[in-house]
Image (cartoon, grey):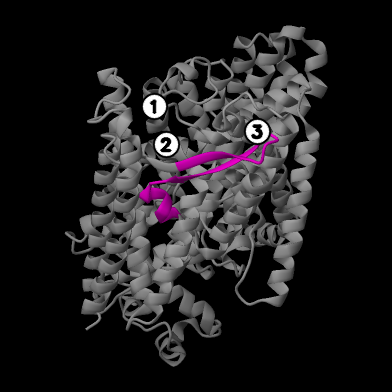
């Protein structure tokens, strides 16, 4: 009976609480209020079987989409928001569904957005000629073990980077707002009838974005529309070259909308450094007037300019870590204090929103994961012909995984809070990790093996980096989800369990999808890729494998990385000056680094999307409900990303099973110029129509 009465109390009213709980005299009011809130929250639906099933299904679809899109564009996208909208549409049929249950669904599905970032490393084993395909169980184990470790590492970081931090977490906050808008009035986080109508509008925005981008991608596959508008040209008569490439991709446009104007401008600065100075400068030094402008530009960018970006990203990542030392130490102290409270029998005094998986269990799970990781490292070392050095490889590899995993978790978590998961510095982190792994192998193993073991050492460095990369990806994603959970009063430990389930589900999907696109297209730089008509760029995997090869063979040009590091230092100084002298303008250093080493095919349309999103937000600010209108823009962008990516996987399957490189093509190469004009005009017109439609729909639902 006592708990029934407590369930009816208003925890915000101290006088009501105090008078109703006279039997608990002497306890602080805040403790009593926490107890009431905890009782209320423990009766709600949150971690349910149906929610987990829906989340796993969404995870399978979105993981496949993200793998394809990441290999094509060098970027992955956050799946939390579209997953939340789909979840609300499905669970609306159940009267007892809650916003917290929808949050669990998006938490499971969000693993697709970041676990698929393993594509930034694993294809490197194909590129160096070590693998010809992706062995399922080894690839699955890398993804699953690294992902579970990422969940564990994020737990002590939650208090430092989420609870006590003022980081904005743009995607986490946006997802929380979407969940609140979609909640019925009779649920815990309620709304009005207009909010429910707006929730339906959000679902329409996602669905139409999905349909439009998918249809446009199909038309591009028919070659009626060109896939990009590009040109490479010579500057003067001395051999210098440059160029540009605007990809006609609604997914890239949408990513630009999501990351915002500051990140878009930062990427434009990086692109100008790379293609306005780097490519012309280094191509001029080569003085190659015999090669075509396109070939020379591509060679210069891939062998010179991208290493500038690597240096800039590395310096930016180290700077980020230095800024994290104090908050991370504070978070660890808070986690230990919570553990002591549980052991003292005072767990009920902790608000339910502060209950993580206990730190002792975190430690045990971490140690348990290290056992199969050690076995995998030993197995890989054995089949690589490095069996004589197994003790060094296993002990050193596990130690490196333990220490570097925490390093990258902290850096990626901070950057997710600053600019969102979609633009997190995972590729830059991979650069640091693979250079560290390769240097350790050069110092500790290379002197004791035969001279022809270079490829084996490269493969081992990439293999170790892959495990750590997954840790970084999931820690980054988990903290974004935990911010969403904090805003909708979710239980952290339940989210953490849900994310482990999502990790395992995603790990089952990634190997077969990677195999599918490998057989359909191949990867740029892999043996035999020159024989494929349209190999996927996989830019980060190419760069990371090149770095591993350069360090181990000793022919890496460190001067390029030092120059890039100096550029990174200058950008950091500029960003700090802007932070102290302006209110809103920033130049995120990691985004500048990405702009330098990603191809313009990926960056320029993101810049266009960032500018378009800024104009849309300015119009939204003049509408009756600015924030709701902006949310519809975010949902439209999410739909555009998912639609193009999913259809990309479908087309990959058609390519594989048909054995034809362009099975949907309706016209030949002679239509290329017309396709660029028609496709470019159609792309711009459709984008304008979509944005105007969203603004009109938002205005109609505000009246």
Question: Mark 2 touching mark 1, by CB under 8 A?
Answer: yes
Marks 3 and 1, the one that precedes in the sequence: 3
Q: Does 637 sit above or below residue 306?
A: below
In the image, 591: left or right of 76?
right
Q: Distance between the residues labelled 2 and 1?
A: 9 Å
Which element type, helix, strand or loop, lies under badge 2? Answer: helix
In the image, 93: left or right of 80?
left
677 vs 181, nearest the viewer: 677
Question: Mark 3 touching mark 1, by CB under 8 A?
Answer: no
Q: Which residue is drawn at 33% across and 76% down?
A: 7
272 vs 427, nearest the viewer: 272
How crowded pointer 3 is (Cα within 10 Å; few <14, some 14-19, many 20+) is rated as many
In the image, 579: left or right of 532?
right
Quarter holding residue 465 = top right
Mark 1 sits on what residue? 517
562 vs 414, nearest the viewer: 562
Q: What stretch is highlighted in magenta?
A: 230-255
53 vs 439, nearest the viewer: 439
Q: Which residue is drawn at 55% across and 48% down?
A: 475
Mark 3 sits on what residue? 300
């Amino acid at each position: 009976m006592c708990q029934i009465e407590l369930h009816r109390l208003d925890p915000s009213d101290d006088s009501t609480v105090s008078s109703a709980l006279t039997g608990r005299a002497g306890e602080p009011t805040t403790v009593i209020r926490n107890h009431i809130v905890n009782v209320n929250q423990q009766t709600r639906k949150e971690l349910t079987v149906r929610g987990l099933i829906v989340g796993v299904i969404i995870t399978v679809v979105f993981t496949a989409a993200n793998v394809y899109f990441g290999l094509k564009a060098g970027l992955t996208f956050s799946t939390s928001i579209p997953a939340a909208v789909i979840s609300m549409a499905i669970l609306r049929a159940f009267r007892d569904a809650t916003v917290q249950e929808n949050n669990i669904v998006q938490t499971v599905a969000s693993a697709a957005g970041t676990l698929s970032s393993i594509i930034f490393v694993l294809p490197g084993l194909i590129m160096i000629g070590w693998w010809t395909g992706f062995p399922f169980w080894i690839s699955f184990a890398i993804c699953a073990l690294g992902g579970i470790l990422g969940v564990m590492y994020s737990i002590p970081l939650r208090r430092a980077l989420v609870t006590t931090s003022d980081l904005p977490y743009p995607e986490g906050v946006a997802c929380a707002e979407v969940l609140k808008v979609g909640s019925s009035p009779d649920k815990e986080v309620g709304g009005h009838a207009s909010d429910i109508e707006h929730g339906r509008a959000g679902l329409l925005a996602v669905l139409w974005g999905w349909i439009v981008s998918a249809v446009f991608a199909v038309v591009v596959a028919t070659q009626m529309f060109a896939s990009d508008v590009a040109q490479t040209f010579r500057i003067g008569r001395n051999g210098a070259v440059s160029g540009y490439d605007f990809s006609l991709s609604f997914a890239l446009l949408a990513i630009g909308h999501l990351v915002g104007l500051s990140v878009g401008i930062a990427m434009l600065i990086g692109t100008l450094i790379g293609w306005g100075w780097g490519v012309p400068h280094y191509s001029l030094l080569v003085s190659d007037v015999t090669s075509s402008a396109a070939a020379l530009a591509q060679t210069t960018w891939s062998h010179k300019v991208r290493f500038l970006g690597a240096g800039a990203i590395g310096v930016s990542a180290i700077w980020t870590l230095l800024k994290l030392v104090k908050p991370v130490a504070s978070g660890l102290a808070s986690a230990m204090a919570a553990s002591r409270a549980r052991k003292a029998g005072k767990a009920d005094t902790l608000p339910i929103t502060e209950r993580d998986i206990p730190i002792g269990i975190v430690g045990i799970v971490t140690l348990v994961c290290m056992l199969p990781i050690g076995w995998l490292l030993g197995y890989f070392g054995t089949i690589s012909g490095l069996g004589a050095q197994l003790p060094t490889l296993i002990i050193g590899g596990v130690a490196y995984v333990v220490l570097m995993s925490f390093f990258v978790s902290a850096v990626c978590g901070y950057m997710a809070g600053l600019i969102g998961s979609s633009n997190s510095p995972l590729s830059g982190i991979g650069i640091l990790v693979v250079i560290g792994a390769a240097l350790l192998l050069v110092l500790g193993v290379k002197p004791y093996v035969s001279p022809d073991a270079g490829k084996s050492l490269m493969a081992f460095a990439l293999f170790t980096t892959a495990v750590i990369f997954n840790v970084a990806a999931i820690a980054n994603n988990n903290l974004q989800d935990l911010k969403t959970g904090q805003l909708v009063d979710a239980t952290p430990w339940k989210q953490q369990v849900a994310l482990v389930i999502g990790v395992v589900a995603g790990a089952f999907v990634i190997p077969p999808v990677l195999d599918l696109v490998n057989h359909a297209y191949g990867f740029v730089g892999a043996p035999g890729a020159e024989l494929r008509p349209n190999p996927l760029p996989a830019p980060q995997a190419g760069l990371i494998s090149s770095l591993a090869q350069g360090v181990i063979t000793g022919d890496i040009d460190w001067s390029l990385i030092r120059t890039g590091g100096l550029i990174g230092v200058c950008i950091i100084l500029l960003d700090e000056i802007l932070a102290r002298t302006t209110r809103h303008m920033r130049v995120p250093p990691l985004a500048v680094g990405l702009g330098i080493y990603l191809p313009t095919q990926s960056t320029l349309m993101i810049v266009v999307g960032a500018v378009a999103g800024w104009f849309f937000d300015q119009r939204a600010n003049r509408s009756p409900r600015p924030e709701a209108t902006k949310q519809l823009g975010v949902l439209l962008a999410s739909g555009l990303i998912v639609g193009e990516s999913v259809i990309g996987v479908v087309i990959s399957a058609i390519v594989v099973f048909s054995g034809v490189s362009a099975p949907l093509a309706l016209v030949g190469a002679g239509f290329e110029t017309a396709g660029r004009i028609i496709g470019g005009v159609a792309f711009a017109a459709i984008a304008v129509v979509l944005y105007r439609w969203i603004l009109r729909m938002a205005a109609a639902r505000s009246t």
